Image (tube, rainbow, N blue to C red):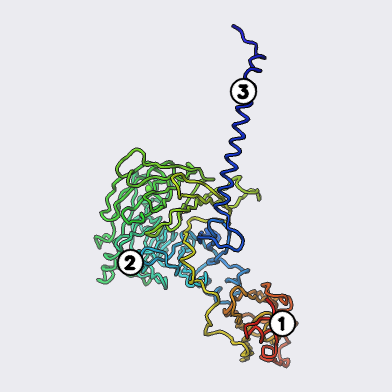
Amino acid sequence: MKLNPVILLLAVAPLAFTGCNSDSTAGRQKAATQNASAAQQIYVPPGKLDEYYAFLSGGQSGSVFVYGIPSCRFIKEIPIFEPRAGLGYANNPGSESYKRLKESGPFWGDTHHPVLSQTDGRYDGRNLWINDKGNDRVARIDLRTFEVAEIRQVPNIQGAHGLAACLPSCKYVFLNGELEQDFAGASTDPAQYHSVIAFLDAETLETRFQVQIVGNADIASSGKDGRYVFSTMYNTENATSSEGMIERDRDAVAAIDVPAAEKAVAEGKFTRVNGVPVIDPEKVPGVLTLIPVPKNPHGCNVTPDGKYVLASGKLSPTVTIIDAHTLKVIAEPEVGLGPLHTTFDGRGNAYTSLFVDSQIVKWNIEKAIKGEPDYIVDRVDVHYNVGHTKAAGADTSHPSGDWLISLNKLSKGMFLPVGPGMPESQELIDISGDKMRVVAAFPSLPEPHDAVMCHRSVLEGKVVQTYEVQPAAVKLGEEKIVRNGNKVDVYMTCIRSKFAPEQFEVHEGDVVKLHLTNVETVRDMTHGVAIPKHGINLAVDPGQTAETTFVAGKPGTYWYYCTWFCSALHLEMRGRMLVKPPGAELSDHPGQVAKEDKAQSAAQKGTPSYE
Ligand code: RUQ
Ligand code: CUA
Ligand code: CA
């Protein structure tokens, strides 16, 4: 029988339309409801604080980005290896931060792995460490001020990549050499190549000892009981070409017995290279164990209970589960394509980033060990090509189990196009239920590799409101100008809305050292001082003293002015540097301004005239 196509079309059309219609309406409604509930989850009303701090490494920006979670609001950039004029960091050649950075190496960095200090298996809110893969440095950030406290270049190492703290004590942080070289860094002969894992004093960042390995060391993670620390190695071939680096079917996880290494150092079983004791494990058995794992592993993560270390396969679709005490491989579950890093919820689940699949896969560790077929719990798509992933508190013994960040390498169409290059893309995933839920995406500067998230209670009461009075501080009313030949010290204070002295005189060519103390006693009253045509822009937080040295330029009037909007008299907050020709007579009026100024004396009594 032949059917009339028109009748057929009419017959099915209403059905088709209703079906389609109701489907899309329901679909849209469902999506809208889901979006609304996701929006509610991340909404933090104005004036309310986020629950978590997320510290994202800044990659080739050389810094650390601080975001609030769950709102995904950007709060601060901590400049470390690169100057940041806005914050007065390392941009004034005569300043302390500039000199310290210059002493440590070049003015750029490639930060990868932020590490928070712990006490008794919990974040303690004291220190944040970060490595610079580009110039083999480590920095320590003091979390009382969120500023760099130490920067140090590490000898005998190239491509200082993996960084972790030795748990449980955090006595050392250890740093992995990813790029092979000879000890002196002076040979081109591959037969001389090896890498070191460097153990640094966690406070001073001085290198205490190093362990030499043949091949390279990539990502680092510490056991929880003070015995072993672990590093993945993808170039056990010790090759110099990418083909050569993928020759072997298995590479390794290196386990270093830290007490055994300390004993070797105490017994003098080392060679001193560039001032650092280096242990050759071939000569001191027991210090290094190589555990074979599939081809070119990447991430290395110890479970919160300290039982297992997981090596993510990268070129193998597996994660290798190693007993962290016996160092035996106990399972190798398949998880998906391109596994890079693994993080934890504290409920027995692992979350592995899959670079090739652009997914986070959630899987149950014990089920995978027992070989139960349903060990994969859930998968969620991320956008796109995830590198690191980190759940809140996941490096401690007590993960929070609620939020996870996916640090994606490509954002493609996720944000408004800003040219051929696009911002980096992070996604926030709710992991509190059985199913994961992507609830937000947020851009950042290039390029976060790793992140660490801690609850705000960790830092409550730790972050200071104002700087403690520093020994070099200039006290209110004690401002002065001290001349010694062509060297001039200007001791200056600032407070809403005045610099004291409001003018000073120097000769052309004088070497002027400015000591500027912000004598405010309330949080957030930052002042800045810019000196036109002299390359000076400082930022000074309440209680802080900044110093910088410069050479006075051509004769003339140079108004120094406040760069941080601080009060209704912010624009009036300025003073004059009067540069006179060599030999001209100079006069000073230091002190008088500070003592007689009404705004200042009011502020001193705690009743500032301008808020
Ligand atoms: S590394 S993903 Cu330092 Cu994994 Cu970048
Ligand atoms: Cu001080 Cu503006
Ligand atoms: Ca290899």
Label 1 with label 2: CB-CB less than 8 Å: no
> Looking at the image, which is closer to me, 40 or 59?
40
Q: Residues within 10 Å of mark 3 (few under 14, many from 20)?
A: few
Please give the name of the residue rendered at 56% of the width and 60% of the height, measured from the top-left corner.
Answer: 61
**Residue 496 coordinates in the image, percent (x, y):** 67, 79
Q: Which mark is residue 15?
A: 3
Amino acid, disc 3: Leu
- Quadrant assignment for the C terminus: bottom right
Q: CA distance from mark 1 to mark 3?
A: 80 Å
Please name the residue shown 53% across and 66% down the image: 81
Residue at horizontal 39%, vertical 60%?
Answer: 396
Residue 575: which numbered mark, if any?
1
Labels 3, 2: front one: 3
Where in the figure is residue 150, as x and y percent of width and height?
47, 72
Judged left or right of residue 289, residue 585 is right
User: Crowding near pointer 1: few (<14 within 10 Å), some, many (20+)?
Assistant: many
Type of amino acid at the residue the image marks with label 2: Val
Secondary structure at numbered mark 3: helix
* Pointer 1 residue Cβ closer than 8 Å to ligand 2: no
Q: Earlier in the sequence, mark 3 or mark 2?
A: 3
**Disc ID at residue 340:** none
Disc 2 marks which residue? 278
